[in-house]
Every structure is written in structure tokens, then in C-alpha cells.
Image (cartoon, rainbow, N blue to C red):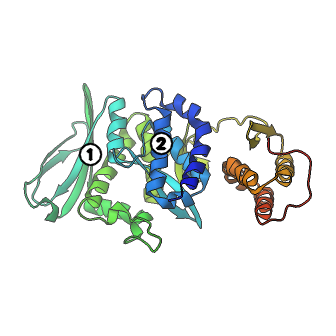
Amino acid sequence: MSSAQLAVIERQLKPLEPMFADLLRPTGVPAARLIRSVIISCDRTPKLLECTPLSVIQAATTGAVLGLEADGHTGQGFLVPFRQKGVQKAQWLTGYKGFNTLGARVGLTIAGAVVREGDAFDYELGSAAFVRHKPQLGAGWTRRIVAAWACAAAPGRDPIVVVMDLDELLAIKARSAAAKRPGADADGEAFSPWNEPLIGFPAMCAKTAKRRLARSLPLSAYIGAARVDEAHEEQGRHAFLHPDRGVVIDGEAAPLAEGQPPPEPAPLARPVFLIRNNKGERRVNSIEQWRGEMLRIIASLRDDSSVERCRDMNAVLFDQYAERHPREVRAVIDAIEARLRGDRGPMQPGEMG
């Protein structure tokens, strides 16, 4: 694993630490610890270093909005790489323990498990919902899973119960893009837990039932986490949580539930085009002005290390602007690549401060 690549990601996340701190303050999770958990995830999953920097930041922002870490040990949340239309992206997924944590923060006790053949199991939905599950002891791994259940309970309130049979669970697995990979691929990309029969598949079944609770719960971070997971696991789309816009799926603000209108996008500050350098960042009024300034700066830089530093500091902006302004961003990237190949081009006044 290249320590230089990890250092680039850390430099990209560091300026966002104040925003993360504001989002995390109610949960008590330090912003530095969230950033460290993202770095650890990238270190353990090399494919994340091939993901667009913007998607890594979006995944980290989702963790900050939810107040959950992605260290891979606590089971609160995970960063996973996936390819969408030829582009490698990082996706935040909330773990089953993360759903428990989100429920507890709003006074809900979240429970759930898989039901196997031979278990004593009874339930009822509706106004007097309940679930009773007494697992049969012994030979647990060999008995067939027939259902999964989840329950959200709180003092003085009727419980919310979800029960899903095996056909429903398998239908969701069939929609998961990751589950279609039977094992690690040639690049060593980890396979989906859906395909690991002893631990992964039961855990995904139980998590799916817990996620379904969100459809009947009061508005909370739990619902946002569930919607992001559903978009990826069941629709194969990239999704994240934005502090102002809420759930964003493939770049567009999305409703939390079917029939709910999408949130109004937060107004964008003007000017919106940024240029980052060693002294901070500067704003310009148009993409044409941004392109001109970036080309001038790149031509003026004295050595390859300065060009690389300029590229790394502005990499997130390249991803952000490329969707609507591909030609302008391509021109800047081409200029950077030309400089690194040794084609300095005409010298212009000014430099990357």
C-alpha cells in the first residue's frame, strides 16, 4: 500500500474536519477519529484508492451525518468500492450494529435475527404487533434459513415488526450488484458477504430486515442510512448523505420514502468555482475563468513536485466540476499531464502560492 496515496486522501479530508466536527458534535465522535477510520478503510481495501476522491469524501460525509465510524471493526459502517459505468466509486454502507446505534440515539431498541428450520417462531403484524423467536440449539449453521425478522421497540409505544421470508431476501440479494460476484476477482476485490454462507449471508438477511424498519419509523438518521443502503444494495446506484440536501442518489437529491417529494436543494454560494493553493482557496465567477486561471498557474509552476501538489489539492474539484464541465476540466488535467511529461509550455506570470 502506498503511504503517499493515503497521505493524499488525508490531505483531501483534512479541510473538511471543521464541518465533520459540527455534524458529529451531538454524537461525541471526534472528527479526527472519523477521518482516521476512513484512512484505515482505504489502507485495508486498496481498491478504495482507485475510487474518485469525491466519492471518498461523500462516503466520509455520510459517516459524519450519521455519526458512525467506518473502521471495519465495530460494525458501525463500511466503505466499499464498486464500479459504476466504468468509474470506480466509494460507497458508504451502514452495518447492522450501526442501525442498532442509530435506533438507540432516538430511544429505540433494535433487535433482529434470522429464523432457521426447527426454530420456534411466531409473530403478528398490525396494531398489536409482536415477534417471539426461540432458536433451536445445536447445528445452527446447517439448518436452512427460512426468514429474517426485526423489531423496533420503545417504552410506551407499540413495537414495529418486520418479517421477511427467504424468497424476499433472495430477491434483494439478486438485485445487489456486489452479490453477483461469486468470489474475489482477479484484482483481489473482496466478494460480497451475501455470498459467504456461514456468517455473511445470515448477517445480510438480518440487516435487510432491520433496514426495512425504516419504512415505518419516525423521521431520523436511521431512515437516511436505510435509504442510502437500499439505493446501493437493491438498485446498484451510488448514494450518500449530504448535510443540507439529505439523501443524494447518483448526484440528485432523492426522497426518503416512496411518494415523498425530494428535498429542496440548498442554495449554492456564488461564486462557486474554487482554486486551491498552499495559502488556501480562491473563488472565481465562471468555469471559463477557472480554466484560464488553472492553466496559467500550471504553466508557471517551477517543478514536478509543485505540479503534483497542485493536482492533489484540486483533485476533488476536478471530480466535482467534470460532470457539468468536462471539456474545461479535461483541458486542465491535460495541462498537468503535459507538464509532468516534461512539456513545460509557455511561461506565464504568477505561480501556485
The residue wearing badge 1 is 150
User: For numbered disc 1, what is the local secondary structure?
Assistant: strand
Residue 161 placement (x, y as % from top left): 26, 42
162 or 222, nearer to the observer:
222
Q: Which residue is drawn at 26% across and 65% down?
A: 197
Question: Which label's residue is closer to the chain start, 1 or 2?
Answer: 2
Q: In which quarter of the image is the C terminus?
A: top right
Task: Answer whether residue 74 is visible to the viewer in this image.
Answer: yes
Please say whether residue 231 is visible from this viewpoint.
no
Q: Disc 1 marks which amino acid?
A: Ala
Q: Which residue is drawn at 50% across and 61% down?
A: 47
324 to the left or right of 51: right
Name the amino acid, label 2: Arg
Q: In this view, does 158 lie to the left or right of 51?
A: left
Secondary structure, mark 2, is helix
- Relative to the observer, which residue lies in front, 47 or 259? 47
Task: Residue at the far left: name it.
Answer: 137
Q: Name the residue under label 2.
A: 36
**In this picture, is 198 found above or below 27?**
below
Report whether 46 appears left or right of 116: right
The residue that appears at 54% across and 51% down in the rendered structure is 6
Which quadrant would residue 145 be assigned to in this image? bottom left
| Residue 322 figure quarter | bottom right
Give the x, y percent position of residue 230: 44, 52
Q: How many labels does the image show?
A: 2
Work out whether residue 340 or residue 303 is closer to the camera in this orientation and state it: 303
Residue 96 x, y percent position in the rendering = 33, 47
Neighbor class of circle 1 (other Cα within 10 Å; few <14, some 14-19, many 20+) is: many
Mark 2 surroundings within 10 Å by alpha-carbon count, few (fewer than 14), some (14 through 19), many (20 or more): some
